[in-house]
Image: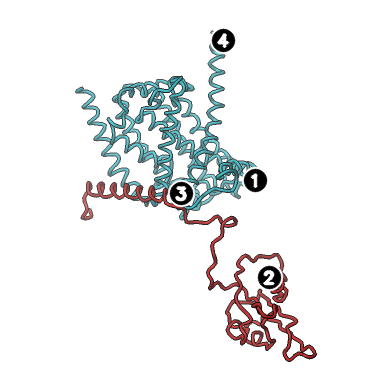
Chain colours: A red, B cyan
């Protein structure tokens, strides 16, 4: 036999069983810790990494992008399609196409780091689901206009 | 004479219909309570979607299960496989016939009521063995074998603890046992027998912490792994009805049955006290299930043979001597 005795086992075991019941009884009356997801939502942490989006320039109302193409070059998976044109009478290029293929993106964040103007940031979208591949080819200019 | 015979027959038919309806209702209530209480213990809301606070969820689940296909596995013993759920359901319905809900609400008061209940409810083991054997699945068979071993060992302390009460009442009639408690409820006189009975009844109903026959982490679902649709739900109905039966026996033998603070129409409204006590015990069983982890098989057997049976025997002996002396 082990060094504990027959009656000691009974006493210690029985006592611990009663303590266990007490623990679960107490949790019964504690507030719930889960959230009813579709009806209640938790606040997302500001560090959340959603897919990237364009930052709105408060002065022009458009994007801050200067069409340097750094993001497209830095992206390890080639997610970006960036095109711009130089309109007559303007010094800078204006952005015409800014597309993100989110199916390839691994959310590494290199594009956000390399952008010289801080024109790209992480979005807070976590609720993304779709039925086709094309639904994840985001047109970020359109998105910026819709959001603004 | 013939008239009286017909009336008795009619009474029995009505009783059986009501009892089967009660078994289904009991499963709905217990399924809901089980899921809600487990949610509370785990600090989450539980059922919330169907009906206010999810009270209709179990009803919907029932409809879903009725509509499901009944699949018989390849190489299964078709006859035993189909028979097992029925054979598991019937023995748990029969004991309800002799349970005294109140002094008049009882289908039939046998002189051997308690023996009848214990004899019938031990048939349940057969159904589990048939289900496990008939499924042609090793996990089912393991579950069934464990269940048989466990049920047979725990029947001994259960019977011994009940026998101590029988020595005091001198009758096996359920109604007689309740009437013998009009002064003092027997759990005060026989606390050890009461505790032993409660522990053994956990094992008899295959409930946690003795739910080895359906230990999901080891045996998927044990003996009912291969069952779908109503085959599965008959096992679940039987499990909850079985819980009700063991709690009713505990209520009748130890907690004074339908005795309580007198209510109007006492001959019938005693059933309220009976149901409060029985469901109180069932809620305790749920509470225990969501508190303790599962025992190992050797611990289960050791506990039965080293603790429950010796204590039950000593308790029986002391009771016998005291009854003789007093």
Tell me the tag on residue A147.
2
Between B198 and B35, the one nearer to me in the picture: B35
Quadrant of residue B52 within the rendered picture: top right
Residue lying at 38% horizontally and 25% vertically, measured from the top left: B261
Tell me the tag on residue B40.
3
- Whether residues under marks 1 and 3 lie with C-beta atoms below 8 angstroms apart, the answer is no
Q: Label 1 to label 3, Cα distance in Å?
A: 33 Å
Residue lying at 62% horizontally and 85% vertically, measured from the top left: A117
Left or right of residue B179, residue B55 in this image: right
Residue B63 on image: x %, y %:
63, 41
Residue lying at 56% horizontally and 60% vertically, measured from the top left: A41
Chain of the residue displaying label 3: B
Is disc 2 surrounded by few (<14), some (14 to 19) or many (20+) residues within 10 Å? few
Chain of the residue displaying label 4: B
Chain of the residue displaying label 1: B
Between B57 and B289, the one nearer to me in the picture: B57
Residue B324 on image: x %, y %:
22, 23
- In primary-sequence order, the first of circles 3 and 4 is 4
What secondary structure is marked by label 1? Answer: loop
Q: Label 3 to label 2, Cα distance in Å?
A: 41 Å
Residue B22 on image: x %, y %:
53, 31
Q: Label 2 to label 1, Cα distance in Å?
A: 49 Å
Closer to viewer: mark 3 or mark 4: 3
Is disc 1 surrounded by few (<14), some (14 to 19) or many (20+) residues within 10 Å? few
- In primary-sequence order, the first of circles 4 and 1 is 4
- Whether residues under marks 3 and 4 lie with C-beta atoms below 8 angstroms apart, the answer is no
Q: Quadrant of the C terminus of chain A?
A: bottom right
Tell me the tag on residue B3.
4
Residue on which disc 1 sits: B69
As drawn, A79 above or below B84: below
């Amino acid at each position: 036999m082990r060094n504990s005795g027959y009656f000691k086992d009974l006493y210690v075991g029985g006592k611990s069983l009663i303590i266990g019941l007490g623990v679960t009884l107490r949790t019964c009356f504690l507030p719930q810790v889960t959230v009813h997801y579709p009806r209640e939502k938790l606040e997302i942490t500001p560090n959340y990494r959603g897919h990237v989006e364009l930052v709105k320039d408060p002065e022009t109302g458009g994007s801050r992008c200067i069409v340097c193409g750094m993001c497209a070059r830095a992206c390890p998976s080639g997610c970006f399609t960036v095109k711009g044109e130089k309109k007559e009478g303007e010094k800078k290029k204006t952005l015409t196409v800014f597309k993100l293929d989110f199916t390839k993106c691994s959310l590494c964040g290199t594009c956000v780091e390399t952008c010289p103007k801080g024109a790209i940031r992480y979005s807070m979208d976590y609720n993304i689901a779709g039925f086709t591949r094309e639904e994840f080819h985001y047109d970020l200019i359109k998105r910026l206009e819709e959001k603004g | 004479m013939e008239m009286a015979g017909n009336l008795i027959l009619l009474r029995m038919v009505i009783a059986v219909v009501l009892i089967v309806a009660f078994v289904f209702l009991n499963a709905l209530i217990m399924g809901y309570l089980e899921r809600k209480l487990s949610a509370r213990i785990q600090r989450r809301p539980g059922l919330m979607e169907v009906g206010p606070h999810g009270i209709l969820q179990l009803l919907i689940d029932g409809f879903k299960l009725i509509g499901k296909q009944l699949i018989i596995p390849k190489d299964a013993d078709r006859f035993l496989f189909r028979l097992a759920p029925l054979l598991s359901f019937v023995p748990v319905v029969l004991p309800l016939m002799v349970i005294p809900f109140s002094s008049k609400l009882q289908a039939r008061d046998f002189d051997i009521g308690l023996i009848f209940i214990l004899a019938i409810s031990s048939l349940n083991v057969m159904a589990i063995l048939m289900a496990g054997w008939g499924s042609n699945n090793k996990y089912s068979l393991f579950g069934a074998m464990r269940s048989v071993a466990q049920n047979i060992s725990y029947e001994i302390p259960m019977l011994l603890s009940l026998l101590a009460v029988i020595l005091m009442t001198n009758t096996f009639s359920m109604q007689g046992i309740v009437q013998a408690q009009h002064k003092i409820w027997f759990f005060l006189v026989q606390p050890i027998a009461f505790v032993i009975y409660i522990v053994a009844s956990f094992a008899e109903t295959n409930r946690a912490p003795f739910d080895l026959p359906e230990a999901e982490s080891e045996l998927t679902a044990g003996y009912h792994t291969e069952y779908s649709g109503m085959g599965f739900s008959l096992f679940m109905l039987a499990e909850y009805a079985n819980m009700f039966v063991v709690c009713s026996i505990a209520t009748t033998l130890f907690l004074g049955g339908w005795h309580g603070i007198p209510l109007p129409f006492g001959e019938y409204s005693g059933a309220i006290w009976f149901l409060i006590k029985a469901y109180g015990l069932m809620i305790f069983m749920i509470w225990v299930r969501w508190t303790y982890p599962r025992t190992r098989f050797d611990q289960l057997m050791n506990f039965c043979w080293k603790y429950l049976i010796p204590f039950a025997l000593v308790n029986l002996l002391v009771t016998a001597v005291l009854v003789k002396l007093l």
